[in-house]
Image: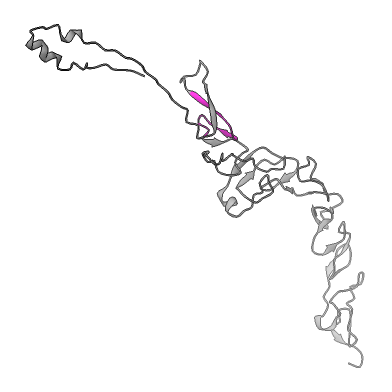
């Protein structure tokens, strides 16, 4: 603050000096400051009640807001890292507009806000509602997804296992890549088979295929078979009474 005292209020004293021929009249006026009160407040956008001075070594001495509501910055003008489930807003008299943590189920503390994700209601908040646009990044413990809610390829979450458990995802076992995709189903751990295989570990031919382990598709005549499913082993289709042949593609005797 600088006060500049440029001119006194003479109350026409300069005219008195002329009338009385007293050149010293105006010299008897002086400045007098009775009281000065100077106040100020930090601009903290409603997210702080206290300001702290910067360290003595800082280039600029200023007051920094002691932020609350998971906000950061000199003026609490942004949400802190990991608390961007919803966009930053200044606090109001009726709502603190606290920055919310991203729900990454404990598998990462890094996330960013995506307005498109929020519009599609794809991000799960900490209250279990699909509100906000927090997107988790660098998911750990073999997880992935907007909320680190899925297991990566080759892992699955056993039935009853919490998505927030550190060991939520365990490796798929016994899923031979020759017969399966290498992935398995959440809950059961059953291998996800290639189209021509079936079973817990893809250990048999799927319906409509025969000839394990090189399962081939049945070539059953649609008109002549019951269900178009061939028998395991020889690939014989189940023929209707008036059809015959391995693929039920010709008329039976007397038909």
Q: Give the residues drawn in magenta, as a range.
A: 63-76
Considering every residue shown, the one lying at the far bottom of the view is 254
**In the image, is 200 to the left or to the right of 127?**
right
x%, y% of residue 49? 54, 29
User: What is the quadrant of the N terminus in the image?
Assistant: top left
Judge whether 33 appears above or below 74 on screen: above
Judge whether 122 appears above or below 211 on screen: above
From the viewer's side, name the closer residue of 121 and 51.
51
Judge whether 85 appears above or below 215 on screen: above
From the viewer's side, name the closer residue of 14 and 7.
14
**In the image, is 99 to the left or to the right of 3?**
right
Name the residue located 17 percent from the left edge and 17 percent from the top edge. Answer: 11
Asked where in the image residue 231 lies, by quadrant, the reply is bottom right
User: What is the quadrant of the C terminus in the image?
Assistant: bottom right
**In the image, is 44 to the left or to the right of 182?**
left
Name the residue located 10 percent from the left edge and 15 percent from the top edge. Answer: 15
From the viewer's side, name the closer residue of 11 and 190.
11
Name the residue located 67 percent from the left edge and 49 percent from the top edge. Answer: 124
x%, y% of residue 82? 63, 38
x%, y% of residue 9? 21, 17
x%, y% of residue 169? 79, 45
């Amino acid at each position: 603050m600088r006060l500049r005292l440029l001119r006194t209020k003479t109350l026409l004293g300069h005219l008195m000096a002329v009338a009385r021929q007293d050149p010293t009249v105006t010299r008897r006026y002086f400045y007098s400051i009775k009281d000065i009160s100077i106040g100020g407040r930090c601009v903290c956008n409603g997210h702080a009640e206290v300001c702290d001075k910067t360290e003595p070594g800082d280039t600029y001495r200023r007051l920094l807001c002691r932020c609350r509501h998971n906000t950061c910055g000199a003026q609490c003008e942004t949400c802190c890292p990991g608390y961007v489930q919803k966009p930053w807003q200044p606090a109001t008299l009726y709502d603190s507009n606290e920055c919310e943590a991203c729900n990454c189920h404990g598998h990462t503390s890094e996330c960013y806000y995506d307005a498109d994700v929020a519009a599609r209601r794809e991000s799960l908040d900490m209250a279990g509602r699909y509100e906000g646009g927090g997107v988790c990044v660098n998911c750990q413990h073999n997880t992935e997804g907007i909320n680190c809610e899925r297991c990566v390829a080759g892992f699955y979450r056993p039935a009853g296992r919490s998505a927030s458990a550190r060991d939520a995802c365990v490796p798929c076992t016994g899923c031979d890549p020759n017969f399966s995709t290498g992935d398995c189903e959440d809950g059961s751990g059953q291998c996800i088979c290639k189209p021509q295989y079936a079973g817990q570990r893809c250990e048999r031919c799927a319906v409509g295929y025969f000839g394990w382990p090189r399962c081939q598709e049945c070539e059953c005549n649609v008109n002549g078979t019951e269900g178009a499913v061939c028998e395991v082993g020889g690939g014989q289709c189940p023929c209707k009474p008036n059809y015959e042949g391995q693929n039920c593609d010709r008329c039976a005797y007397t038909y």
